[in-house]
Image: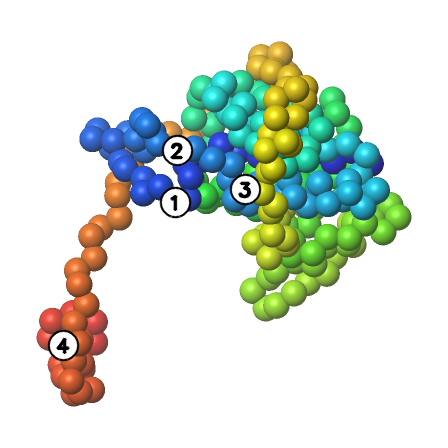
Amino acid sequence: MKVLVAVKRVVDFNVKVRVKADQSGIDLANVKMALNPFCEIAVEEAVRLKEQGIATEVVVVSVGPVAAQEQLRTALALGADRAILIESNDELSSLPVAKLLKAVVDHEQPQLVILGKQAIDSDNNQTGQMLAALTGFAQGTFASNVEIAGDQVIVAREIDSGMQTVALKLPAIVTTDLRLNEPRYASLPNIMKAKKKPLETLTPEALGVSTVSTNQTVKVQAPATRSAGIKVKSVAELVEKLKNEAKVI
């Protein structure tokens, strides 16, 4: 079984993001970038399937600038076998990314595609579902447990009312939730080995995919600053402040 894992380069979750002065986007100058946390979980799950003897090859793919090779090398150090970078400096929305991934799926013919349920920068939670629609594959989103059973993948999904278990006929697409696994740390020997693993670079043009987006960023703003809280001595004082100061009741 070949497993394809899509990963994304994002601002490290420990970094406090800054908005550009012209409010055109996020200031990425001298900012630490990292592998999207949900994508790390996806890579870990694929590597575990390989360690169990279920997967024979793990291929990671990313869409982004040349610098995204760093995150692909990280995924290779975590246990993936080879990597593909679809090089693009454009700010792509979910649909163009899904179309690019669909072209890779058509070429690689994986039996299982694993993605993080969302990226921590845009928080769209759309690419996996769009890719499933484009490929016609079954989909299991928000996975907290994944098991392969013959020609099916059994996915336990986290939903609003609890847990839902679905059986998907392979090939299928799975998007990972936080509780699926705990990603490993890349060891120094594996980091060194990752430098020699194959990394192929493609372009949207080579894949025959248009990346023209119908979305346009109008303005990016930082969240409003919250005022400090206060302590009240009684319920009566709380009600008075909510009524006369906060004016919420």
Residue 80 x %, y %: 68, 32
Q: Which residue is mark 2?
A: 32
- Of the residues under marks 4 and 1, which one precedes in the sequence? 1
Badge 2 vs badge 1, beta-carbon distance below 8 Å: yes
> Helix, strand or loop at disc 2?
loop
Q: Residue at x 61, y 45 (%)?
A: 184
How far apart are labels 3 and 4 at the CA level?
A: 42 Å
Q: Tell me the distance, in whole angstroms, between the alpha carbons under discs 3 and 2.
A: 25 Å
Pointers 1 and 3 in contact (C-beta within 8 Å) = no
Between circles 1 and 3, the one closer to the viewer is 1
Pick the residue in front: 196 or 229.
Answer: 196
Which residue in the protein does label 4 denote? 241
Looking at the rendered structure, the kind of residue marked 1 is Asn
Quadrant of the drawing holding the N terminus: top right
- Between marks 1 and 3, how big is the CA–CA gap? 24 Å
Q: Classify mark 4: residues with Cα within 10 Å, few (<14), some (14-19) or many (20+).
A: some
Q: Nearer the viewer, mark 2 or mark 4?
A: 2
Q: Which residue is mark 3?
A: 126
Q: Position of residue 160 (x, y in %)?
A: 56, 64
What's the residue type where badge 4 is placed? Answer: Lys
The correct choice, above or below, for 98 with respect to 53 in the image is above
Q: Secondary structure at mark 4?
A: helix
- Residue at 77% x, 53% y is 147
| Other-residue count near label 2 (Cα within 10 Å), few / some / many at <14 / 14–19 / ≥20 | few
